[in-house]
Amino acid sequence: MGGKLGNSNKKDGFRYEMNFFNEALKRGLDVFIPAGDYLPQDCIIQNSEGKIYKVQVKGTNTSVQEKKVKKIPRYRLSTGKGTKGKTVIDCNDCDILVGYVAPLDTLYLIPCQEILGVSTWLYPDDPKTKSRLEKFRDNWSVFDN
């Protein structure tokens, strides 16, 4: 039963999803995972009040060095849908985008309306970042509304 899986991206995506599911369960959230991977969300989360959230999980495990003098890495998260001619994730299909930065084991829980393009940049290594998305790092309160 051993051997390599054919698609490394698919394998990485599965790991990112499992990491998020585990963290959500630890926080008392209920996780509903659809059969198959053809839906525009990876799971449905239900909070303790019964509120439902459609969640898409994306991740990255490679950084890009900034060209500035400080050389602080940033992480690119693909926040588009489709395989050709990507478009921004549709907020009718997704309430929360979870961005997982694998090398740092860090989750960003971003409301869909905050996603502005097919790529989103995260700066978890930069203590001086002014990124508007930094407030969503480990922001589990998005499931309280």
Image: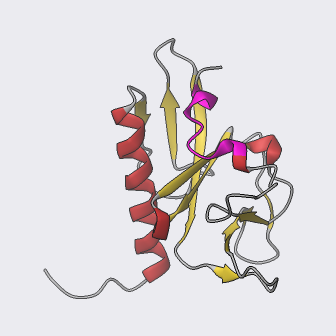
Confirm whether residue 110 shows in the render.
Answer: no
Question: Can residue 39 be found in the magenta stretch?
Answer: no
Q: Which quarter of the picture shows residue 116?
A: bottom right
131 vs 111: above or below = below
Q: Quadrant of the N terminus?
A: bottom left
19 vs 85: above or below = above
Residue 28 placement, left or right of 137: left
As rendered, which of 23 and 11 lies closer to the eye?
23
Name the residue rendered at 79%, 70% in the picture. 86
Residue 143 placement, left or right of 64: left
Residue 48 placement, left or right of 100: left
As rendered, which of 84 and 11 lies closer to the eye?
11
Q: Which quarter of the picture shows residue 53?
A: top right
Name the residue rendered at 46%, 15% in the picture. 48
As rendered, which of 106 and 57 lies closer to the eye?
106
Give x and y (percent) for residue 66: 76, 81
110 vs 32: above or below = below
Q: Quadrant of the C terminus?
A: top right
Give x and y (percent) for residue 26: 34, 34
| Residue that sits furthest to the left in the current view | 1
| Residue that sits furthest to the top in the current view | 49
Give x and y (percent) for residue 51: 57, 19
Give x and y (percent) for residue 3: 21, 88
Confirm whether residue 19 shows in the render.
Answer: yes
Magenta part, dominant SS:
helix
Q: How many marks?
A: 0
Name the residue rendered at 80%, 86% in the picture. 67
Name the residue rendered at 50%, 32% in the picture. 45
Magenta stretch, residue numbers: 135-143
As rendered, which of 144 and 51 lies closer to the eye?
144
66 vs 91: above or below = below
Residue 105 placement, left or right of 110: left
